[in-house]
Amino acid sequence: MLIALDSGVSALVQFQQSLNVIGNNIANVDTVGYKGASMNFADAFSQTMGSNASGSMQVGTGVLTSAITNQFTQGSITSTGVQTDMAVNGNGFFMVKDSVSGAQYVTRDGEFTVDASGYLVTNNGMRVQGFTDAGLTTMGDVKIDNTGATMLDPISGLPVADTSAVQSYSFASDGKLMVLLSDGTQFTRGQVLLQNFTNPQQLTKVGNNLFSGLTAAGPLATLTAPNSNGLGSLVTGALEMSNVDLAGQLTSLITTQRAYEANTKVITTCDEILQDLVNLKR
C-alpha cells in the first residue's frame, strides 16, 4: 500500500481537529473571559528504508496532534458601568465555589451579580471566594451585608454591632469590599481574592467559563489579594473580553482549508495509482 495514502488520511484527521479548534475560537470571539486555544502538529513514525553514505533513508507516515493548548494572554478590558463586574488586569483567576457540591473552580469571567442572600455570585450561581470579615482573616463566600460593622454604644461607649441597612457598596482595585450603611458608617466587609498557578495549561475547561483541575495546575500558596505577589489588579465596572484574534483565526481557517484540500488531492492521486495497478493485472 502507498505510504502517501496513510499520510494523506492522517492529515485529514488532524486538519479536521484543527478546524474544530479554530471554529470554537471564532464562536467564542465575544465570550467574556474566554481564552483561545491553538493546536500543534508533530510528524508521525517514519519508516527506515535503508541507509547510505549520507545517512538513514526514511519516509514519514503522516502527522499527529502534539498538543492543544490554551492561550492565557490578556483579553481587552471593556467598561460596563456595573458595580459588580470585575476584570483581572494581569495574572490570576477568580476562585468560585458550587454552594451545593462544594466543588471549586477558577474563572477569568468577572460578570458577577448579588443573589437574594447577598452573596457575590457568577451568572450560574457559583459563589465568589475571598475574605469574609472586616479583619480580612477568614476565607469563604464573599457576602454583602452589615456583618462586622460596629458603632459606639451611647451609654457604655463600647463598640457594639451596627445593624443599619446597607445603603451602597463598592470594590477597590485590590478587591476590598467597602460597605456604606444608612447611618453613614463605612467599613470593610471583605475582599475578593485571586488564585494563580505554576502551570495553568493543566487547567481543564468545563463550560460556563469555568476551569477545573486546580491541583494539577499547581496553585501558588493560598488565595491572594490582587495587586500583590505578581497578581494583577482588579478593574471594577468592567469585563475582560475574549483574547481571540479574529483576523488571525480567519487566516488560520483559510490555511487549514487549503491544507485539507491539498491532502484530499494526495489521497485521490494515490487512489488513481492503485487503480492503475489493478488494471495492469487485467
Image: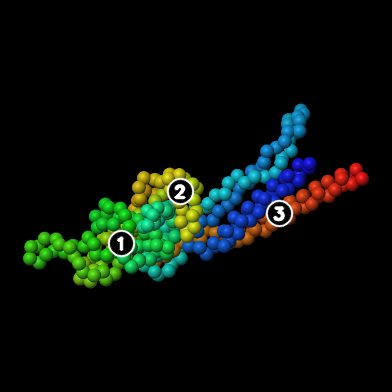
Element marked by disc 1: loop
Disc 1 marks a residue whose amino acid type is Lys
Q: Disc 1 to disc 2, how far (Cα)?
A: 26 Å
Relative to residue 263, is residue 77 depicted above or below?
below
Local packing at callout 3 (Cα closer than 10 Å; few below 14, some 14-19, many 20+) is many
Q: Of label 2 and label 3, which has the lower sequence position? A: 2
Question: Which of these two is toward me, 35 or 2?
Answer: 2
> In the rendering, at what x and y percent does residue 41 appear?
63, 46
Q: Which residue is mark 2?
A: 213
Q: Which residue is mark 3?
A: 260
Local packing at callout 1 (Cα closer than 10 Å; few below 14, some 14-19, many 20+) is many
Question: Which of these two is toward me, 199 or 214?
Answer: 214
Q: Disc 3 to disc 1, how far (Cα)?
A: 53 Å
> In the rendering, at what x and y percent does residue 281 appear?
90, 43
Q: Is residue 237 visible?
A: yes
Q: Which residue is mark 1?
A: 143
Disc 2 marks a residue whose amino acid type is Gly
Q: Is residue 198 visible?
A: no
Question: Which of these two is toward me, 67 or 232?
Answer: 67
